[in-house]
Amino acid sequence: MKKIETKDFIPSEYQVRFSGATWFKKALDVTVEVCGVGGIGSYVSMYLSRIGTPITVRDFDTVERVNMAGQLFPISCVGMTKVRAIEKVCKGFAPESSITLMGERVTESTILQSNIVFSCFDNMTARKVLFDLWLKKCEEVSTSDNPGLFIDGRLAAESYQIYIIPFTDKDRIKIYQEKYLFS
């Protein structure tokens, strides 16, 4: 991905609000992978795309009417794959957004596109598989400028939990594996 030169960079009309933020240009220089685009992942995808962060979205599922209550899909998306539906939603908010669609289940043979990953699954098995894939990806591609980050969002009816694990924090990785990746 092409690095953005500060002197040459002009934010789009959709990005002007963020252009003074210290993290803004860095957010445009990385790709973020959002795995599971339901109750958490649909919103994460939309917000990242509005900033201008290139995203890869992964989900094998289809939008159903039961998804309308807690997921960011309009009724017109019922019957679409979730990755196509989230692309439609994101492009509606940010037409210039860069979205790569991966309409597949995450398995042990999945090849991640980024070492910055949002785990937005609704099951622990998928989280464990994704975390192991992320560790492998970070070992291959992490740098001091982009060491890798795993963000696990969990949603229950009245609570929301976020676990943030930087690849550089081996203690936090161990705690997450032992305490929070339960069966």
Image (cartoon, rainbow, N blue to C red):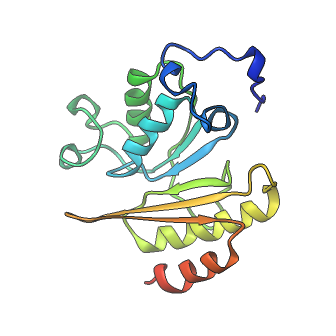
Is residue 94 positioned above or below 175 on the image?
above
Q: Give the image quarter of residue 44.
A: top left
Q: Give the image quarter of residue 131.
A: bottom right
Residue 40, percent across and down? 36, 52
Residue 104, percent across and down? 51, 51
Classify the position of the C terminus by image quarter: bottom left
Comparing 154 with 108, the one in front is 154
Residue 34 appears left or right of 174? left
Residue 77, percent across and down? 29, 33
Residue 69, percent across and down? 18, 46
Residue sitting at x 23%, y 47%? 67
Residue 148 appears left or right of 57? right
Classify the position of the N terminus by image quarter: top right
The furthest residue to the bottom: 178
Comparing 104 with 41, the one in front is 41
Residue 148 appears left or right of 32? right
Residue sitting at x 61%, y 39%? 23
Residue sitting at x 60%, y 45%? 32
* Total marks in image: 0
Residue 57 appears left or right of 155? right
Is residue 164 positioned above or below 111 on the image?
below
Is residue 143 positioned above or below 47 on the image?
below
Residue sitting at x 75%, y 23%? 6
